[in-house]
Amino acid sequence: MGIVAASVIESVEYRTNKSMLEKFLPFFSITWAKKYAGKSKFTAILLKPAGDGQRLFSKDREILLIITKYNTLFPRLLDQAERVRREVGITRVDPVLLFVTGSGEIFEKETQDFNNRMDQLNIIIPFMNEAVLEDSEGHCVERQIKKYRQFKDLFDISDPVSEDIYYFGRQDFTKDVSDRLRRGNNIGIFGLRKMGKTSLIKRCEKIIGTYRDAKIVYIDLQNAALYRMRWWEVLEDISIRMGNNIKSKFNEENGAKRFGNFIRKMDDGKRYIVAFDEIEHICPGIASADHWNNDFIELWKTLRSIQIENKSKLSYLVSGVNASVVETSHIGEIDNPLFSMVSVMYMPEFSNSESGLMIDTIGSYMGVDFDDDSKIFINERFGGHPLLIRLACSRLFQKYDSPDSGDIIITESYVKSHISSIESDLYRFATHIIFVLEKWYPNEYSMLEWLSQGETEVFADLARKHPEYVSHLKNYRIIDSDSLQIKINLIMKYLSNRLSGKIKDDTDIMSDWQDITAIRNTIEPLLRKFIKATLKYKYGKDGWIKKVLAAVPEKDREKLVGIDADDILQSRLYLLNLREIINKYWDDFKFLESGEKRNQISKNSMLIFIDTINNNRQDAHAKDVSPIEMDALRISSRNIKLVLEDYLS
């Protein structure tokens, strides 16, 4: 049984809500309370797990309870929760869980919709005011907690993480990278897809941001608005992110000079580390836009020469899956300016202890407990690859039959009984992960095929003749350094079955991904123009950007202060940000539902369309798309393109 802190028990906040808060005491102590006024009125309470609550939650963090009388989730709930967390101390409050009270079916339905969104890493557990107060036996609180702990599969999250709570393992590697960057070293971070490269950069950005002497300027080259830029426009964009208040655009003739002048005049004492993530998007021969076949050389010649002149002010980080961009001495007949410019580092795999910590932490929020042997088996089976480990845990969670929503116990024997079907289910991710080898390192890929067929003597002979091939496979953490065996059983099994004809070739899958990418590259620019045109017509030349920013999470909004409005919309927002704008202001876009029936676009169809092209892009955690879904996507894209072009004409 929990207790009420002396500082709380006589407070107005506690006395006003005493009847409700007493229902939480079997599970929590109440340590802090405060009432907030303004547009959104609520009372914030901190709950520390006690009694039966210690079985359900970590004793290290307190949980924030927001008490409201609203019948919907009030606007900016997460922003307000973050405000409270910062006020009482970030490390004190659990960053994932949030308890909220409200009234009515709509309130709970909106909470369920929020928890279903995979772009949100929070879990909101709703409590109906009436149900809690009327619960004479005290089961309502426990029932809601158990219901919503397993409502969301937190293992099935594949986007890069920026929250500390979701950053696991490789602490020494992260510190090494951060220290090198602060010292002014140029670094290249490479590894298989979904090994955590972007999450590493985000983590280094936070670490370096705690110092006053350096800052990371993050450039996400998978953003179509960026890779469509010419080389001088990229320099302009970097300078703006570094604080350059330009009065006129850079051009091909003056871009290099103006960027160099800006760097030379900087006197804030900081080293700026320009981090180019997803570097493949601008690499000659494989770039997402043809002009980079020439612009790549111009960009890096300029960046290299300016750094030589300003060593204390500027350094670079490049990240991607294809290390050949820094290993190749020439591009065609021209010297590669990136060759020998950066120190190459490859992402390490998870150790058993690092993987175990990730599984335990995520599982604790879901009421899922993996025993020690099961965690070791999963990590070794999937070669320490973070995404594959999480996906395997997700499938194990989904297969578990737990009708009473009680805690789930995963044992090694349970894992082994399901591992074969799980690996078959994950074949498409094997394709996605080793695509880099098949496309850019065909000789190394062939060696893997020999290994998967048990032809170790052929592999050993090739390894003696071409040790550089083996070096690549070791660096990508695909084969074991000592045994020279494939470390990720899923990849060995996939290659073996593919060669024996037991599974279809992945050409069709790649074709679908390419079609989806083409659709996205066509629709996304139109969508950005459409959003601006519509909101500008409704709210004026200054009001439209205020609406756009209001739909951006507060922590991201702070980074956009002082940046040109058009630059924010065109270069700084992701497709999911556009989705949120459309969702939030659908009343302003509702005219799309009128007109001829064949050209009507409903809110639901627009949001589904955006989710589909975002979730299935080639550089993401892509899911299989059925032929029927693919045909529907092509049809809806043509319709949306026609309507948007008609409106913008």
Image: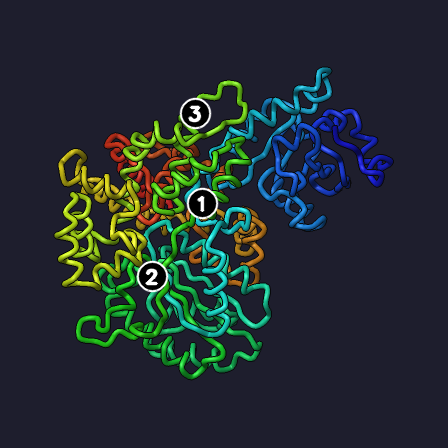
| C-alpha gap between disc 2 and disc 1 | 28 Å
Mark 2: amino acid: Ile
Instruction: Categorize mark 3 by other alpha carbons within 10 Å: few (<14), some (14-19), many (20+).
Output: few
Whether pointer 3 and pointer 1 mark residues with C-beta atoms closer than 8 Å, the reply is no
| Residue that mark 1 sits on | 355
State left or right for residue 144 relative to residue 331.
Answer: right
* Towards the viewer: 290 or 149: 149
Picture coordinates of residue 111 (x, y %)?
Answer: 56, 31
Q: Earlier in the sequence, mark 3 or mark 1?
A: 1
Picture coordinates of residue 438 (x, y %)?
Answer: 20, 52
Q: Residue at x 30, y 40 (%)?
A: 637
| C-alpha gap between disc 3 and disc 2 | 40 Å
Picture coordinates of residue 198 (x, y %)?
Answer: 42, 55
Whether pointer 3 and pointer 2 mark residues with C-beta atoms closer than 8 Å, the reply is no
Q: Residue at x 65, y 43 (%)?
A: 60
| C-alpha gap between disc 3 and disc 1 | 21 Å
Secondary structure at numbered mark 1: helix
Residue 279's disc number: 2
Q: Earlier in the sequence, mark 3 or mark 2?
A: 2
Q: In which image quadrant can residue 298 be found?
A: bottom left
Secondary structure at numbered mark 2: helix
Secondary structure at numbered mark 3: loop
Picture coordinates of residue 512 (x, y %)?
Answer: 24, 41
Q: Is residue 566 visible?
A: no
Mark 1: amino acid: Ser
State left or right for residue 574 relative to residue 634.
Answer: right
Please state which of the two labelled residues, at mark 2 or mark 1, is closer to the viewer: 1
Mark 3: amino acid: Tyr
Q: Residue at x 54, y 65 (%)?
A: 208
Q: Is residue 623 above or below residue 545?
A: above
* Towards the viewer: 517 or 165: 165
